[in-house]
Image (cartoon, grey):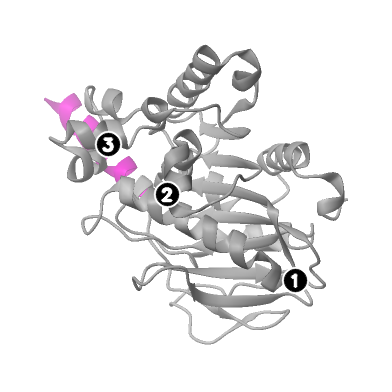
Amino acid sequence: MRKTVVTTIALLGVALLLAGCATAPATPARGGAASGPTSPGRPPTVLPDGATVHRNLAYGTDPLQKLDVYVPADADNAPILLMVHGGGWKRGDKAASGVVDNKVAHYLPMGYIVVSTNYRLAPAVNPVTEAGDVASALAWVQQHAGDWGGSAENVVLMGHSAGANLVSLVAADSSIAAKAGAKPWRGTIALDSAAFNVVTIMDAPHLPLYDPIFGGKPELQRDSSPTLRLDTAPAPMFLVCGSQRANSCPQASAFASEVAERFGKAAGDAIEVYPINMGHGEINAELGTPIPLTSAVDGFLRSIVPENAARSSG
C-alpha cells in the first residue's frame, strides 16, 4: 500500500512538472532590458544590443493565435527559429522565461530571428487542432519573414514537451502544413516530447496529465501520434530526449526507427535522437546556455541551414 501511495505522489509530481506554469509576459524594449510590467519575481527578458521585438502579432482570429518576433540587429535574410511552448496541451505562454530568455540571448547574436508562438489550448480544442495552429503560424511567418529581414526558406521549427509533440505532428503528416498553406522548412527540433505514440502511452501506466486530453478517445490518441501519422519522410529532425524519463527516449527512438523502416535508411539517418541526462524543464530553459545540449542543437542547425544564412556563434 505504501509503495502505491509513493508511486502515485511521484507521478503527480512529475505531471505538474510536465504541465508547466506560464510566466506572465514581459514587454521588452529595443536592445536592452525589458520594460513594462512583469510578474513578481520574474526577471525581465534582456535583448542583445540593437535587437527589437514585435509582440502579439496575429496569425489568426483567435486571441491565442498570436506570436512574438525577436529580431537581431541588422537582420538581412536571417534564418528563423520558430518556438512552440509546452504545457500539457492546455496551458503555457509564448513569453514565459523558460521558453524565450536563453534562446533569444544565444540565437539572436548568431544571426537568427526567434519567433515564439501561442496556439489555442485544450479543452477548447484538441492537440490535432493545436498542430494546425502551429502550421498556420509557420505559414504566416514564412509569408512575413521579409518584413523583419528574415528568410522564408530557412525556417526551423522547435517545440518543447506538448509543443514538441505538435511540431513533430506537423513534420510527420504533410497534410497539416499543406492545409495551412505552409511551405517546406529546413527541419524540426523536438525538446523532450515523450508523446510520439500516444496510443502506447495510454495503453500502459502513464502520467495523469494525459487523461483529460486523451482518456477514452482512441481516435484522438492515434491522430495525435506523430509515429502513426507519418505519410512522408520528414525534413531532418533532432529529437532531444531526457534520459531521466522512462518514455522520452524510447518514444523518440521508435519514431526514428519507423521513419527508417517506411522510407529507407537515408530518411532514418536524418532523424537524430539525442539522449541527455537533464530534467524536463531544464532542457527547455537552459537551451542557449553554454552546455552540451546547446552545442548539439547548434550543430544540427549548422547541418541544415546554409552556412551563409547565419553569423557564426564563435
Apparent side of residue 110 relative to residue 40 in the rendered image (left or right): right
Amino acid residing under circle 1: Pro
Q: Position of residue 228 (x, y in %)?
A: 36, 26
Name above or below for residue 75 compared with residue 286. Answer: below
* Magenta stretch: helix, strand or loop mostly: helix
Disc 1 crowd, CA 10 A, few/some/many (<14, 14-19, 20+): many
Q: Secondary structure at mark 2?
A: helix
Apparent side of residue 215 relative to residue 274 in the rendered image (left or right): left
Instruction: Tell me whether circle 2 and circle 1 mark residues in contact (CB < 8 Å).
Output: no
Which residue lies under the disc numbered 2?
179
* Residue drawn at point x = 47 percent, y = 30 percent: 244
Q: Is residue 101 magenta?
A: no
- Disc 1 or 3, which lies upstream in sequence? 3
Q: Is residue 8 magenta?
A: yes
Q: Position of residue 225 (x, y in %)?
A: 35, 32
Tell me the quadrant of the picture where the N terminus can be found: top left
* Of the two numbered discs 2 and 3 in the rendering, the one whose residue sits closer to the viewer: 2
Q: Depth check: give the residue in front, 202 or 286.
A: 202
Please tell me how many numbered marks the rendered image carries: 3
* Residue drawn at point x = 36 percent, y = 72 percent: 61
Q: Position of residue 253 (x, y in %)?
A: 50, 21
Q: Secondary structure at mark 1?
A: loop
Which residue lies under the disc numbered 3?
11
- The residue range painted magenta reads 1-17
Name above or below for residue 274 compared with residue 105. Answer: above
Cα separation, mark 2 vs mark 1, equals 36 Å
Amino acid residing under circle 2: Lys
Disc 2 crowd, CA 10 A, few/some/many (<14, 14-19, 20+): few
